[in-house]
Amino acid sequence: MRAVWLLAGLVCVGVGGVGVVVPGLPTTVFFVAAAWCFSRSSERMERWVLALPGVGQLVSDYRSGLGMPRRAKMVAIASITVAVSISAVIALEHPAARAGVTGAGVVGIWWILQRVPTRETELARRAG
């Protein structure tokens, strides 16, 4: 089972790495998943993800319940909106496909707004 978790973590790192350069493809969520997989397979790889510049601190914050920085939430919501709009208006012709993509986008935005804490708000709550 350890090898399966290691492979899943490596796949998540790969997709997250692609997300760094491909607009609209999330990055941090794949590194959060990679760290989770590595926590079950390789302590060394888990430490590596947590030490990555740029993304390591975001993964640590998410794990500690701080969620996402406000700016990252805005960028994620904007990226989802743009990707869904392009897909639904330009790329997809079938109404069911358009509805499916739009529905997935709405659920993603709802999840970010309602289920993922905002780092600044969470820090203020913990301080006060």
Image: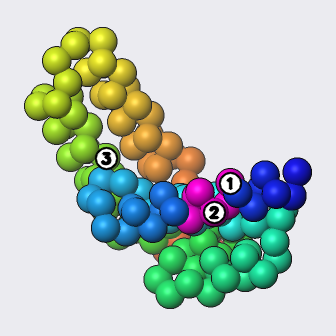
Q: In this figure, which residue is indicated by the disc labeled 3?
A: 80
Q: Seen in the image, is 66 located left or right of residue 112? A: right
* In front: label 3 or label 1: 1
**Residue 58 is at least partly visible in this image:** yes
Circle 2 residues within 10 Å: few <14, some 14–19, many ≥20: many
In the image, residue 2 sits, relative to residue 124, either above or below, namely above
Q: Residues within 10 Å of mark 1 (few under 14, many from 20)?
A: some
The residue indicated by pointer 2 is: 10
Alpha carbons under labels 1 and 2: distance apart: 5 Å
Q: Secondary structure at mark 1?
A: helix
Q: Which residues are magenta?
A: 8-13
Residue 117: x %, y % from top left: 55, 59
* Residues at marks 1 and 2 touching, judged by CB atoms closer than 8 Å: yes
Q: Is residue 45 above or below residue 76?
A: below
Q: What is the number of the mark on residue 8?
A: 1
Give the amino acid type for the residue marked by disc 3 in the picture.
Ile
Labels 3 and 1 touching (C-beta < 8 A)? no
In the image, what residue occupies the spot 56% across and 48% down?
115
Residue 45 within the magenta-colored segment of the rendering: no
Question: Which amino acid does the dot numbered 1 rest on?
Answer: Ala
Q: Earlier in the sequence, mark 3 or mark 1?
A: 1
| Residue 49 vs residue 124, the one in the foreground | 49
Q: CA distance from mark 3 to mark 2?
A: 24 Å
Image position, residue 72 (x, y; %): 39, 67
Residue at 63% from the left image edge and 63% from the top image edge: 10
Q: CA distance from mark 3 to mark 1?
A: 24 Å
Quick one: which residue is furthest to the right in this view?
A: 1
